[in-house]
Image (spheres, rainbow, N blue to C red):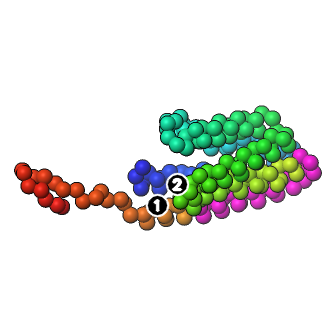
Amino acid sequence: MSKNNRIASRVISMILGVLIGVALVVVGSIVKAETLVWLAFVIWGVVVVIGNIPGLIYAIANIKTKGAIFDLIASVIGILLGLGLIFSQNEIITIILAAYMIVFPVIRIVLAKSAWAEQLGREILRIILGVVLLVFGGTIFAVGMDILNLLLSIIGWVVIALTVILGTVAIIKIATEKEAKPADAPIYVEGEETKE
């Protein structure tokens, strides 16, 4: 993928992340807590489903490569858990989804070996959201919904901040990368070998 396409992809991801954060802040400010619980988990489920579709497509397209089976399994599980969260908001589904959002990214980071730092940059938001869901998801069902409005606003601001920071770092990294140049190859001109 060219440098411009990679930057465009990061910018689009940043815009989507900021829009999700803004939506969380707005919804946390104006909607009743009971409606908010339902809406928050439906939105979270939709984000999980949409976030796993590219991994599913990649895994299917590259099924014969080394990590494609893992990506396929992780994406299918993510889509099923996201659908479960959309259609059945309860504490068990929330805990399972939170564990999924923590465990699979950690496995991807470990499997990345030498490229673990780059993979961490890709997975950190999922891990943070999984921890937030694990810590506060059960609390919403067990303790009540008094803090939900404030919590969603805080999560929205955190999502916005992390999206902008991580996206900007990724764009700067991509923009400052040097293009790989092909090795000097001999050029044959009418029976002579020359080098460029």
Boundaries of the magenta span: 141-167
Farthest residue, direction right: 143
Residue at horizontal 78%, vertical 43%?
Answer: 96
Residue at horizontal 70%, vertical 60%?
Answer: 158
Amino acid type of the residue tagged 1 in the rendering:
Ile
Amino acid type of the residue tagged 2 in the rendering:
Arg
**Camera sees residue 149:** no
Q: Earlier in the sequence, mark 2 or mark 1?
A: 2
Q: Position of residue 84 (x, y in %)?
A: 76, 35
| Residue nearer the viewer, 151 or 107 | 107
Residue at horizontal 61%, vertical 55%?
Answer: 109
Label 2 to label 1, Cα distance in Å? 10 Å
| Residue nearer the viewer, 72 or 10 | 72
Q: Is residue 27 left or right of residue 160?
A: right
Name the residue that disc number 1 marks.
Answer: 174
* Count of residue discs: 2
Q: Position of residue 24 (x, y in %)?
A: 73, 52
When asked about the image quadrant of residue 89, the answer is top right
Determine contact: label 2, label 1, CB under 8 Å.
Answer: yes
Q: Is residue 183 left or right of residue 15?
A: left
When asked about the image quadrant of residue 44, the answer is top right
